[in-house]
Image: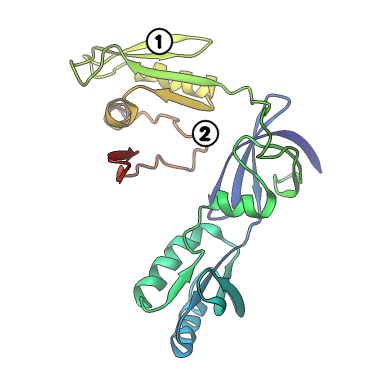
Amino acid sequence: MNEWTGWLLDLYPHPKYGIILWLLCDDGKRRCLHQDFQVTFYATGSTHRLRALWQFLQKQSPRIELFRTERNDLFDGSTVVLAARLGQPSALPTIYQGAAQIFPDLTFFDADLHIALRHSATYDTFPFARCHVVADEQGLIRELAVLDSRWDIDHELPPLRIMTIEPDVDPEHTEPKQILVHTPRASISLDVRDGLSSLGFLGYLLKNYDPDLIISLRGDTWIIPLLLRASKRQDHALLLNRDPERSIVIRPERSYFAYNQVIWLA
């Protein structure tokens, strides 16, 4: 067994390993570990429709553990529900979406909770929490203990490696000529006018510096789309994710109206 202490950098579901946890250990190494983690969602409604849902879920893959239980509803009090428990969290969104489309008359609970929230409820984890883990030689976490509290006022901050990427001018006002990349170790500039032909320098810096955090100016709207187009055109992959198995996730922006103003969320 191996034991490490460090900061929790990230966690997310994996189709094979349950969930992946990245730990910035006290020795300065970023370690990719995995953990078995079950997720459960619930449904309530008429008895015959719950029975139909039971039969539907029995046919799904991976295997789902089904059982009848009672849960407390905020308005209705104790309620009989069908519980569905999966050992593969990455499969939950697809299974839930299929069930919701076929059974729109049923009410589902806990089906769209973020995996980090579920993990927090089980292990009291939170972003950059100091953790002590015991893992086997394959990186499977056998024990996990959080060493501090989310309610602490003065947390010990992790020594993050940060890279900044920004255009030489604001693209909202004029067309940039260069993209400027800075790390504590090096600074480079990429010429936009030649189609970012020197993109390999950025790839080299990403691989060798391996930043924990990339801070960009106009990143969502201009820099990242431009870099991805150039990367595809040159057939030169950019390691913007530390996990090579994960692709870049692009979500549409959202907005809501509050206190007489429109608030945009990227």
Q: Seen from this angle, which residue lies furthest right?
A: 1
Kindly report the distance in space between the C-alpha atoms of the residues bearing marks 2 and 1.
21 Å
Q: Residues within 10 Å of mark 2 (few under 14, many from 20)?
A: some
Label placed on residue 188? 1
Query: At which x and y percent is residue 181?
Result: 40, 15
Q: Earlier in the sequence, mark 2 or mark 1?
A: 1
* Secondary structure of the residue carrying numbered label 2: loop
Q: Which residue is mark 2?
A: 242
Residue 17 in sight in this render: no
Q: In the displayed structure, does residue 122 sit left or right of residue 210?
A: right
The picture quadrant where one finds residue 49 is bottom left
Q: In the displayed structure, does residue 5 sit left or right of residue 197?
A: right
Label placed on residue 9? none
The one nearer the camera, 153 or 260, is: 260
**Quarter of the image containing the C terminus?**
top left
Query: At which x and y percent is residue 102?
Result: 36, 77
Image vertical order of residue 13 relative to residue 66, above or below: above
Q: Are marks 2 and 1 in contact (CB under 8 Å)?
A: no
Image vertical order of residue 207 relative to residue 183, above or below: below
* Coloring scheme used: rainbow
The picture quadrant where one finds residue 166 is top left
**Quarter of the image containing the N terminus?**
top right
The one nearer the camera, 155 or 64, is: 155
Residue at x 59% of width, y 69% of height: 85
The one nearer the camera, 149 or 134, is: 149
The one nearer the camera, 136 or 118, is: 118
Q: Identify the amino acid type marked 1.
A: Ile
Residue at x 23% of width, y 12% of height: 177
Image vertical order of residue 79 relative to residue 96, above or below: below
Residue 243 in sight in this render: yes
